[in-house]
Image (cartoon, rainbow, N blue to C red):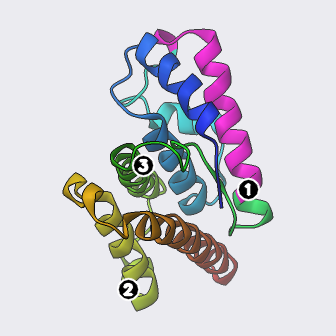
Amino acid sequence: MKRDGQAYKVLTQLFEKNSLLVSVSEIQGVVFGYLTATEEPCFESWVEDISDLVVWDDIDTDLQTHLKNIFIAAHVEVVQSAQHFTFITPSHEAPVASQLTAISDWARGCLYGIGLGALSREFFENPDLEEAVNDLAQIAQIELSHAQDEDVQEDLEYCFSHVEAVIGLLYRAVRESMHEE
């Protein structure tokens, strides 16, 4: 698991310049969730699906390019490994509160992206998959009050690692279910 704090800074500025109401981490989470839960992910379909978060024609071409690159990079990471990702979040040196916010945003975005995949309720009747999604929901609800805890950095690393494992599990399960049909 890697974190790209530099890309996070650049993209955060672009998001602010374009008045987006979602965070960089949340959008990347949406991408990963969508790629994980969609049988045949397509960039153009994703752009349409997120129109309530990002109105494509209202953002500048520089941000459009960056978002397309996030989609492509995530697609490569999910398809090639489904285990080790580069998170666009604050670096390890950033204040703990911003790191907690970012992993919470990422998990919330991922749940939104999974929802875009329109998986059936039956898919989540598998206890392991239900637990994985519930774990994402718990990470999405992390409270900033934990930012003062002594072992929070260790907990953060666990959250990032766990999110990677959940995405890998969901991706493999979706692909296996496609082959069963």
Q: Nearer the viewer, mark 3 or mark 1?
A: 3
Please tell me the numbered disc located at residue 99: 3
Q: Which residues are magenta?
A: 57-77
Q: Taking 57 as reference, is 74 left or right? A: right
Q: Residue furthest front?
A: 150
Q: What residue would you read off at disc 1? A: 77
Of residues 48 and 88, the one nearer the viewer is 88
Q: Is residue 163 above or below residue 173?
A: above
Q: What residue would you read off at disc 2? A: 125
Residue at mark 2 to residue at mark 1: CA–CA distance: 27 Å
* Residue type at tag 1: Glu
What predominant SS class does the magenta segment belong to?
Answer: helix
What residue appears at the point 40 percent right and 43 percent down from the top-left corner? 95
Q: Quadrant of the N terminus?
A: bottom right
Q: Nearer the viewer, mark 2 or mark 3?
A: 3
Residue 102 position, x and y percent, is 41, 46
Residue 139 position, x and y percent, is 34, 64
Crowdedness near tag 2: few (<14), some (14–19) or many (≥20) residues, C-alpha within 10 Å: few
Task: For mark 1, give the secondary structure.
Answer: helix
- The mark nearer the N terminus, 3 or 1, is 1
Crowdedness near tag 1: few (<14), some (14–19) or many (≥20) residues, C-alpha within 10 Å: some
Residue at mark 2 to residue at mark 3: CA–CA distance: 32 Å
Task: For mark 2, give the secondary structure.
Answer: helix
Q: Nearer the viewer, mark 2 or mark 1?
A: 1
What residue appears at the point 41 percent right and 34 percent down from the top-left corner? 23
What residue appears at the point 33 percent right and 74 percent down from the top-left corner? 134
